[in-house]
Image (cartoon, grey):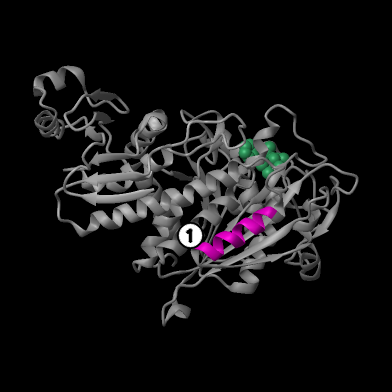
Amino acid sequence: MQISLSKQPLPGFPTLFPVFQDDHTDARLSQIAAVSGLEKSVLESLFRGEAKETLPLPGSSGTLWLLGLGKKTGFREVRNALRSFSHRNKSRLPEGINIDIQGIETHAEAMLNGFLLGLYELGQHKTEEKKPLLLDQINLVSEAESPDIQSFITRAELTAASQIRVYDLVNAPANFLRPEDLGVRTTELGTEAGFSVRVLDKAALEAEGLGALLSVGRGSEFPPVLIVAEYTPELPDSESLPLIALVGKGVTFDTGGLSIKPSTNMHWMKSDMAGAAAVIGTMDLVARLKLPVRLLGVIPATENCVDSHSVKPGDIIRSYSGKTIEVIDTDAEGRLILADAVSYAIKNYQPDVMVDLATLTGNCILALGYHAAGLFTQNETLASRLSAAGDICGERVWRLPLWDSYEDELNSDMADVKNLSGKPVAGAITAAKFIEAFTGKHPAWVHLDIAGVAFSDSEFASQRSATAWGVKLLSSWIEGIAAGEKPYI
Ligand code: BES
Ligand code: ZN
Ligand code: ZN
């Protein structure tokens, strides 16, 4: 897709006019009246500017589309209005389109990002010939002389491209994305975007002693891997930059193992690697933006399947940290593989700050619904920075406690810890407490439970599909660190 910025619309192509429903509407409709040759009063009678409302009008040099942005001016609302427009109209768009951003340039990133996301094609496995997308040029139109607009455009475009890579990974069915495939895909992206990737295979995991990851992987013929990705910018003082570790749960399919899940909606569990995909997408984006930070991505990737070799309820396993774990429920596999991944990251890399993302518990969905991810940390600075970044971009987080009084739930009679509390309450918190036990009291660790936000119902698909949740949140937070914010105490 070619993306340009110019003072005049490209002739012969339609022009989209996004319009807020506020005190800006009046001036905007006057502008549209002038180019359309229609009376402003006529426009006012046809169009109110409500979110996602569209009005096509004939114009002398191509169709004009009015698109309502509604009253709210948040990043998410603006992005979704444009995404909705391009999603609904992609099959009828010609080779080029103008988007008039005059007077609303500060929303350029949200608008272009949404427009590009709306062009995403889910039906990649359909065999029926489909109408190809003709559109290959988007021209943003503004007379403003601000150098910021070009940087908004670059960020919108690179962010959409990384988010679409995440859609592809999370939407991929388990038979198209095995744990090893996730390693191959990350390696390919690393080569394209500029970060290095090592994939520890089963033999390496055995040699290094990642017993928790190996135990979850035992029930599958497709072996587990640990993916380790590193991004260091090409700068003279790069070694002195802060090291940010991102850890993502990469369960490419979660049957529950021998503690098997009910079959209704089990197909959703192809998305149990959405944390891993968010880590990969964020690394991809940060590397392409060439941000001045060091990033480490650690992804434990495995299937959780049923087999005579599967780990059994009651088994005791030895994790990478040396701690022994009594496996009460094999469906609580995410915390097992994260235990190994966080202790591997800390022992081998000593990151300054560490965020793990995981589709970890149904209980987090019970607490927060599909509106926010659960955020767990003992670090006040990190909690407020991530909450603020989430409020701005619309990928919201809500903090839940990590008090020590929850810890007793994890005491095992036979091993150092057990992977499931005996009580049917506070499951998202006890899962977070379990992971915390493997962080060695790291002062700047955050856990994000993304079970409710990573794979959702939306107007863009008839069934649940990937949201790429986390890429925008983490990349905006990392941009703050790149600009000099101290992310930790
Ligand atoms: N992958 C699931 C959590 C999940 C549930 C993600 C729904 C997305 C949507 C996780 O591995 C799991 O099975 N968790 C169990 C934990 C329980 C056994 C303590 C759960 O939430 O039921
Ligand atoms: Zn599970
Ligand atoms: Zn799971």
| Residue 425 in sight from this viewpoint | no
Along the horizontal axis of the image, is 29 left or right of 396? Answer: left
Q: Residues within 10 Å of mark 1 (few under 14, many from 20)?
A: some
Amino acid type of disc 1? Asn
SS at mark 1?
loop
Residue drawn at x 51%, y 60% as measured from the top left? 283
Mark 1 — residue? Answer: 379
Locate residue 358, reporting x and y percent.
60, 49
In the depicted structure, whether residue 168 falls above or below residue 129: below
Between 154 and 294, the one lying in front of the other is 154
User: Magenta segment range?
Assistant: 181-192
Q: Main secondary structure of the magenta part?
A: helix
Locate residue 417, reporting x and y percent.
75, 55
Between 94 and 168, the one lying in front of the other is 94
Write down which quadrant ligand 2 falls in.
top right
Locate residue 74, reporting x and y percent.
31, 40
In the depicted structure, whether residue 263 falls above or below residue 356: above
Residue drawn at x 59%, y 60% as measured from the top left? 188
Locate residue 8, reporting x and y percent.
17, 45
Answer whether residue 433 is magenta in the image: no
Along the horizontal axis of the image, is 114 left or right of 231? Answer: left
